[in-house]
Image: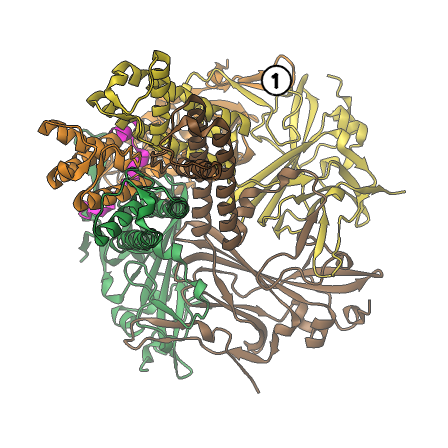
Chain colours: A green, B brown, C yellow, D orange
Amino acid sequence: MKKGFWRGKFKNSGAEFKDTGFSNLASAQGSRLLDSNGKFQVKRTGSTNWFSFSFAHELISMSWGKFLGIIFGFYVLVNLLFACLYYLAGMENFMGGIARTESEKFFEAFFFSAQTITTVGYGRVNPAGFLPNIIASVEALMGLMSFSIITGLLYGRFAKPEAKIVFAPNILISPFQGEKALMIRFANARNNDLAELEAQVILSLVGLEEERNIRKYYTLKLERSQVTAMPLTWTLVHPIKDESPLLSIDQEGLEELEAEVLVTIKGHDTIFSQTVFSRTSFLPSAFVWNAKFKPCFRKSEDGLETILEMDKLGDYELLA
Amino acid sequence: MKKGFWRGKFKNSGAEFKDTGFSNLASAQGSRLLDSNGKFQVKRTGSTNWFSFSFAHELISMSWGKFLGIIFGFYVLVNLLFACLYYLAGMENFMGGIARTESEKFFEAFFFSAQTITTVGYGRVNPAGFLPNIIASVEALMGLMSFSIITGLLYGRFAKPEAKIVFAPNILISPFQGEKALMIRFANARNNDLAELEAQVILSLVGLEEERNIRKYYTLKLERSQVTAMPLTWTLVHPIKDESPLLSIDQEGLEELEAEVLVTIKGHDTIFSQTVFSRTSFLPSAFVWNAKFKPCFRKSEDGLETILEMDKLGDYELLA
Amino acid sequence: MKKGFWRGKFKNSGAEFKDTGFSNLASAQGSRLLDSNGKFQVKRTGSTNWFSFSFAHELISMSWGKFLGIIFGFYVLVNLLFACLYYLAGMENFMGGIARTESEKFFEAFFFSAQTITTVGYGRVNPAGFLPNIIASVEALMGLMSFSIITGLLYGRFAKPEAKIVFAPNILISPFQGEKALMIRFANARNNDLAELEAQVILSLVGLEEERNIRKYYTLKLERSQVTAMPLTWTLVHPIKDESPLLSIDQEGLEELEAEVLVTIKGHDTIFSQTVFSRTSFLPSAFVWNAKFKPCFRKSEDGLETILEMDKLGDYELLA
Amino acid sequence: MKKGFWRGKFKNSGAEFKDTGFSNLASAQGSRLLDSNGKFQVKRTGSTNWFSFSFAHELISMSWGKFLGIIFGFYVLVNLLFACLYYLAGMENFMGGIARTESEKFFEAFFFSAQTITTVGYGRVNPAGFLPNIIASVEALMGLMSFSIITGLLYGRFAKPEAKIVFAPNILISPFQGEKALMIRFANARNNDLAELEAQVILSLVGLEEERNIRKYYTLKLERSQVTAMPLTWTLVHPIKDESPLLSIDQEGLEELEAEVLVTIKGHDTIFSQTVFSRTSFLPSAFVWNAKFKPCFRKSEDGLETILEMDKLGDYELLA
């Protein structure tokens, strides 16, 4: 709690706002609000209501490996379960079976179950008695219903509208109209067409107030916070003037105040016709002072197209 | 109709608005507008147009038990219907049948129907004559079409975008910037990411006017009614000053005026990319005067994450 | 073209606006812009680009009878086509066939096709030769793909988010705060929950200008044009004062000026999480002067719920 | 770099704005920003992250021919792969096979695979041994999952909400309220109902500034930029007065400044309940000076409907 800087050099700005959904009690918070992938560093405990866990959200969000593993595990387990039921109902109630040993009979039941739940139904092995017929009818219905949900989840995952915004790794402080401005550059890594983009930049600082570490939030006013399209790059420009909280902070100050710059980009994915969000955060180490971004696009050979060079997105030059 | 309070102590505020979709005639209304789960306490009658009933909305909204029961019942009924048709068409027009008694034949028809409608089609029993072939072709088409709708409904239910907002059970009246403020705290119980949240708080009071009980609605002005994200909690703050209708009401007044506080939270579910709503309402018994919420999050052991303790969401301390 | 009224009694209002997407040349327009179901009375011709016809929109919008007829016709036609192919490839290349006459063979091919395209695949009749196997492989793929689209359309139709707004059949001119106001009442006929409703009311009048019949449009300013929820009814109130174009028009004037009142209601269907629109239009014959709506809801027997009586939605009483 | 016009005759307007997502460095850009179909003329290179390529977006956006080719190729390849696996596992582990030569056996495996992956499962050829049963169980699961995604993509393509806006090929400069105005006319070629339309028109000019070719962007202020519905046509009207950058530019100037007029139309597709965008751009050659659009709709024979003649959408007459 050595935040002398807070009161000393830092001009408390009118741009501050009270409640961001992040809360202000810095000492009760983890060291970073957002990681650079835009994921909130928050864990929930004590939620007694088991149903507050959403299967659908989890299954859509988890990694592909984990998801496919769960599907495969579910498939094997359900088939094992029904294999047991068929086996208990008696494999002599089936026609077409060729198994002789008990383990062969169990596997015959297992594969019959797999053929039923997927509705393949080759039919060499087929239920003849009443009980296996009932179980198979239920399994076929259950299979169709399970695969309904799997179908939806698979396509939901595959075709999830998502902005693939790539940010230049550095925040630049560049000369701008005779003054200085904070610059954040990014581009859409995909060829899909984002429309009606909106950007919001929040600066979070931790300072000492009434003997407690308090986190404060400042909206950084942008020269332009909306564009209708972003075929190339978009550079967010926050002029450091007037009420900007950055007016009296240097690199040392950013570090002492545990600065974190939170960026939210919102856009409309015109292919899936849905609103997408992209978030990131920058720490003080990402700041470069007195530099400017180099162009990262050029005219194509034939002069008809513009080539956007994504690998040059972060390129900048230091100014004298 | 003993609302002396209405005219006596209660300062009629400029924040009142005329039409909320709830209507003002209190004597014709049930005792509560919204239950605490945010469901409107309204029933419709006299809608002569049968089609105004929406199967899809009902099937999406009903409980899982009821939904699965309806699907299962539909499955059994349709199979019974087609079993009758096959039986009437004559089971001698099928090949592979092993049934001897009439009831066995009927069940053979029933299970053949189940195998057809689910498209399992084992094929031991299979249609040979013209008529059963026609019926089976129609049943297979009907099966595919029915399961199309069931597929959609199942996934629609499973992956319904829904905000799982948990509210602290009490409304606090807390000291705030030298005055008092009404505080409502809530959090997202799920790990999914809600963006662009908006809150609206309406106070409904019933008073006597021209010899009739009239319900009036007041929008409670919030210090901040929008946040871009809510990883932790959000506390809605309504300062009790200026035009606030709460300026001249105490606990007794709330009860006499049959106060109900209606809260609507709107957000954007970033995983399903859709807008979700959450509503609740508070009765006078939920008010706690001169108290403040305790923090309900803390730094994780490793200092990297913030732990949100959902079971402490409602914790508050009474002030001297 | 006898619109003396236009210039005579009618005060040209500042609420007029220029372009509504309807255009102003009344003499080139049909007699009514919207029918009472909210469907625009417009037909398109001369669109040389065949693709401007959208199958998906047509198939979603058409009647259920027509839609199911098209699906059934498609099913029969595709099966006939593949039956021909199998027949031409030679039914001797199939195993399990029992047909003897040529027509029996054709029907065997037809039913085999139906079993393949629905993926039922009983398998008594099954392809043995190379050519029928190739055709059957293609048909099964085609079947899966066709039913993909049919699945989507069926569910899209079944679960189409749609506001089922029911309007009172009359527009009332009622006393309101010492003046008069135009009143339009409506309710949601479904139990689903509409949120964030917005209403817009436009008055269209046809008058003589520079020797031509010109249609003009006036936005009728509403006392309240948004509500957050509409559990009961909503009465749109347009006070007839200030710039209201209705200030100097009576019933006779409405008829002479070929008035049409266009109402658009927009809302958010919270179950399907989508924006829905409802439109209607009223002709002068729907106006009732100096009347007011009667309440159409009451307290339930147990006093807990409010009963909305949809059949009393249009009830009004004439005032002295 | 001979842009004398830039400084000479062209009055630099206050309507200019800084960042459009297009960037200002004209010399690094292709000759045109948007083609007339509204597609940005931009190519991305150097995106090292392979995953920035989105399969789903590509598969939804590509032509139908290419899409169906990919599905068919995938079907053949997967069947070939599983045919190899079955063949290697030994066709003697199958029952019902009739193949004698090795190539016949391979094709039997191939067709068995096709019957399994589509879940047709005739079952004449069916797995008897453990290994083929395992492989077939996995293939059936994989088939269901692959076709889940194909189902979604197919319907996503088929029912993609898309505005089919048709623009008149020319921009007219017409007399308007004693002055001149730029006019752009368009209509919805489909019968579907677009609601809440918004239009934005941007003029892009290239001029010489500090020895570099700079592209500047000007929002052209519209008389009306929103309509609630567009059953007929909509003519965008930009009055050339006040701050309009067109005030001092003639045809020669447009060409010298490499003018490009970018039009974005946004609307709500009421059938699919989604937001759709339509873009186009006009070059100087599309301008027609001192002309006005002819009406392109008329009353139907029976006087009830309005006929919109799409082939007359671009018709105009030159004024004296």
Indicate whether B140 appears above or below D48.
Answer: above
In this rendering, position of residue D318 left or right of residue C78: right
In this rendering, position of residue B277 left or right of residue A240: right
Q: Quadrant of the N terminus of chain A?
A: bottom left
Taken as a whole, is the magenta stretch helix, strand or loop?
helix
Q: What is the chain identity of the residue bearing mark 1?
A: C
Q: Which residues are magenta?
A: D47-69
In this rendering, position of residue A165 left or right of residue C317: left
**Residue placed furthest toward the front:** B100
Residue B32 percent coordinates (x, y): 68, 62
Residue B10 percent coordinates (x, y): 74, 70
Residue B250 percent coordinates (x, y): 69, 76
Count of numbered badges drawn on the protein = 1
Residue D260 percent coordinates (x, y): 35, 30
Indicate whether A163 appears above or below B199.
Answer: above
Asked whether D58 falls inside the magenta stretch, the response is yes
Q: Quadrant of the C terminus of chain A?
A: bottom left
